[in-house]
Amino acid sequence: MEKTLVLIRHAKAEAGDILHSDFDRSLDKRGLGDAAFMGNRLKESGIIPDKIISSPARRTRETTQLISGALGYDTDSVIWPEALYNCPAYSFDDVIASCNIADNVQTLFVVAHNPGISYYAFGLCAGRLPLESLPTCGIVGVRLQVPSWHDMAMARSSMLFFDYPGNLG
């Protein structure tokens, strides 16, 4: 059975400082615009999630809310697993499986952080991404041959698309 996994790096965040935790960093002005822009690009391309999981950090939450708004996706349905916050690439399969995503979900969005999400995307795409790291608000679509989201570690995968705010092609 084919499924689509859409990996999204959060949009550009404010610089960190010693007064605020990394978890609480919000999107900056560019990030706010980029997240809404990329949500509209996904909508225009007809890429709509059946389910979204997102890191609960402020910048990923804001990115998820802006993209969801553009797509008409109800953010009350988002799953916010703590394990996605700074998740290493080798843990993404386990985090997805732990969310108990129903087998009838065909398109799953995952919103998370670098470097984990970039390394995970590179692994799924057999290193075929044109950039070394996903830019902020970069999006990678992956086609999976897998019957269940619980079986991610056994999935055959191939890249469907790669997009980011500065992509003009």
Image (cartoon, helix red, strand yellow):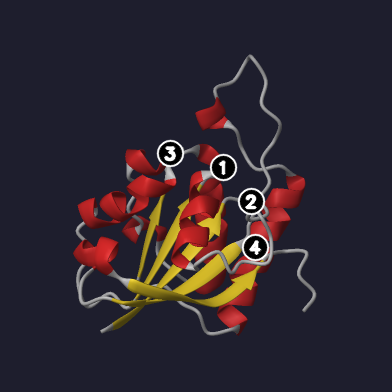
- Mark 4 lies on a secondary structure that is helix
- Which of marks 4 and 3 precedes in the sequence? 4
Mark 2, secondary structure of its residue = loop
Is disc 3 in contact with disc 1, using a CB cutoff of under 8 Å? no
Determine contact: label 2, label 3, CB under 8 Å: no
Residue where numbered disc 1 is placed:
59
Q: Nearer the viewer, mark 2 or mark 4?
A: 2
Q: Is residue 88 left or right of residue 155?
A: right
Q: Are marks 1 and 2 in contact (CB under 8 Å)?
A: yes
Q: CA distance from mark 1 to mark 4?
A: 13 Å
User: Quarter holding the C terminus?
Assistant: bottom right
* Mark 3 or 1, nearer chain start: 1
Q: Say whether disc 1 or disc 4 marks the residue closer to the N-terminus.
A: 4
Say which amino acid is labelled 3: Tyr
Q: Nearer the viewer, mark 3 or mark 1?
A: 3
Tags 2 and 4 touching, CB below 8 Å: no
Label whose residue precedes the other's in the sequence (2 or 3) = 2
Look at the numbered disc 1 and give the secondary structure of its residue: helix
Residue 36's disc is 4
For label 2, the residue is 11
Q: Residue at x 55, y 67 (%)?
A: 140
Amino acid on which the number 4 mark rests in the picture: Ala
Task: Name the residue at the front extreme.
Answer: 126
Q: Residue 131 placed where, x, y %?
A: 69, 60
Front-lying residue, 162 or 85:
162
